[in-house]
Image: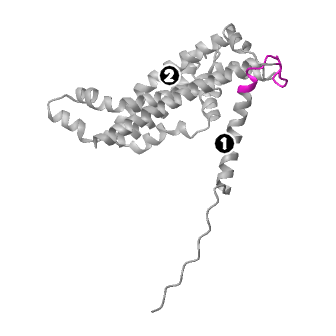
Amino acid sequence: MVSSPSKPPSKPKHPFSWQFVLTLLMYAFMYIPILILAFYSFNASRFSASWGGFSLRWYSSLLNDSRILSALQDSLFIACVAVGISAVLGTMMAVGLAKYRFPGKGLYRGVSYLPLIIPDIAIAVATLVFLVSIGFSLSIWTIIAAHIVFCLAYIAVVVSTRLSGLNPHLEEAALDLGATPAQAFIQVLLPELMPAIFSGCLLAFVLSMDDLLLSSFTAGGGANTLPMEIFSRVRTGVKPDINALSVILILASGFLAFLSEYLRFRSERRRLGQE
């Protein structure tokens, strides 16, 4: 009886492999600057490079900075209006592309999602040239119109992803039970889409609050968003008050991202539970 040759013993994998080290270096490169920024936001000195002791003065000074508060108010107004309009249009676009067939549907889908891949600088220059060519004066409303362009695409993508995972017979069952198409959409389809709509709105809101290029190119006199105000200040050097403002924005953005992911996770668990 011939015994099968024994396999050579496999080498135990070392827990600290090169993949682990590269991942660690990547995260360090991403988050160590943020930790340094957060550390110096509590610096009592007026100069970021020298440590002058622990202090909360720069956080309290933000509450008395009229320019920062005015820019924040403009950014919130722009983001809320742009996201609100984009939520309606993006949902309608996603539902229309998923349910109906019409000539040029593939071309329309590709054009609708172009803002996701076109560089922001290209969109900003194109928007500015278009507004100038038609003689439209720049104002806060031109910033809102420019923000709707990319907010619409992001919300439509998130809603389309949710639509692809829904049971297509739910709306048909409601129609068979006597509901009108509007009732079937509002009472059956829309509640299933709400987590995706809300998640897409949170994502679009963060992107709108963070936008600098489009706002800079399409802003008129008197319009000043928070990224524009921050950029104008850091050109002369980063001050501790900018560090404090950056920490607040990072925490707010992280909370919105966590909330969006939590809603998506709950929606996915609910869908799997129904199946």
Taking the spot 54% from the left edge, 15% from the top edge, the residue there is 77
In x, y percent, where is residue 212?
65, 26
Nearest to N terminus: mark 2 or mark 1 = 1
User: Which residue position holds label 1?
Assistant: 27
* Residue 104 visible in image: no
Taking the spot 82% from the left edge, 17% from the top edge, the residue there is 45
Q: Quadrant of residue 142?
A: top right
Disc 2 residue type (three-letter): Ala
Taking the spot 72% from the left edge, 20% from the top edge, the residue there is 242
**Nearest the eye: 128 or 48:** 48
| Left or right: where 201 falls relative to 105 | right
Q: Is residue 39 magenta?
A: yes
Image quadrant where one finds the C terminus: top left
Q: Quadrant of residue 43?
A: top right
- Between marks 2 and 1, how big is the CA–CA gap? 33 Å
**Nearest the eye: 99 or 23:** 23
| 32 lies above or below 253 | below
| Left or right: where 34 falls relative to 198 | right
* Range covered by the magenta-colored residues: 38-52
In x, y percent, where is residue 104?
39, 43
Give the numbered dot on residue 183.
none
In x, y percent, where is residue 204?
51, 28
Taking the spot 85% from the left edge, 23% from the top edge, the residue there is 50
Image quadrant where one finds the N terminus: bottom left
| Callout 1 secondary element | helix
User: Which residue position holds label 2?
Assistant: 82
Instruction: Check disc 1: other Cα within 10 Å, few if <14, some if 14-19, many if 20+.
Output: few
Q: Quadrant of residue 267?
A: top left
What secondary structure do most residues of the magenta stretch adopt?
Answer: loop
**Nearest the eye: 173 or 238:** 238
| Left or right: where 186 falls relative to 194 | left
Disc 1 residue type (three-letter): Tyr
